[in-house]
Amino acid sequence: MSVEAKPISRYGVPSVVAAAIAVHQDSATSRDWPVAIYRTLKEFGVAQTCYVPDAGHSRLIKLAHADTAIKTTVLTTEEEGVALAAGAWLGGDRAVLLTSRAASAIASTCCR
């Protein structure tokens, strides 16, 4: 998949997670899935990463912290991440909110 053929969500923004799976399908299901996701975030020009500390994302979080081109923000709730990502978008940056599957339902409540 080339950078021009980005999957688009129903809201008109690239679906980075879907792209990570499509671009690195073999790697995304292996033990190195954090590296595959990190590479995809870099490929799509993500400049900001925010997260509530989570052991499941620890390797991906460490990769983001080690990259001086990515600003990382530790959150206390996922709702803060939605606001941060929206602000990044308004400012011209791409951002991702790393969240657990359970937290996705919680974060979606602030968007209703």
Image: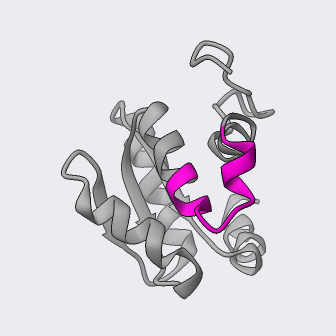
Tell me where residue 67 appears, x and y as whole percent. 25, 54
Classified by dominant secondary structure, the portion drawn in magenta counts as helix
Say above or below: 66 vs 85.
below
At horizontal 81% and vertical 33% (from top left) the residue drawn is: 10
Examine the rendering and report whether any part of residue 82 can be seen.
no
Horizontally, is 41 left or right of 33 in the view? left
Answer left or right for 70 relative to 56: left
Residue 61: horizontal and vertical position, in percent? 41, 69
Tell me residue 102's x, y (percent): 76, 80
Q: Quadrant of residue 2?
A: top right
* 36 or 7, nearer to the observer: 36
Does the magenta run of residues contain 81?
A: no
Residue 25: say if magenta: yes
The quarter of the image holding the C terminus is bottom right
Residue drawn at x 69%, y 77% as measured from the top left: 103
Where residue 89 appears, as percent x and y from the top left, is 44, 38
The residue nearer to you, when weighing 103 against 80, is: 103
For residue 26, above or below residue 34: above
Q: At x 45% / y 47%, what residue is drawn?
A: 95
Query: Which residue is found at the position 67% from the left and 34% from the top?
Result: 23
**Stretch of the chain drawn in magenta:** 24-36
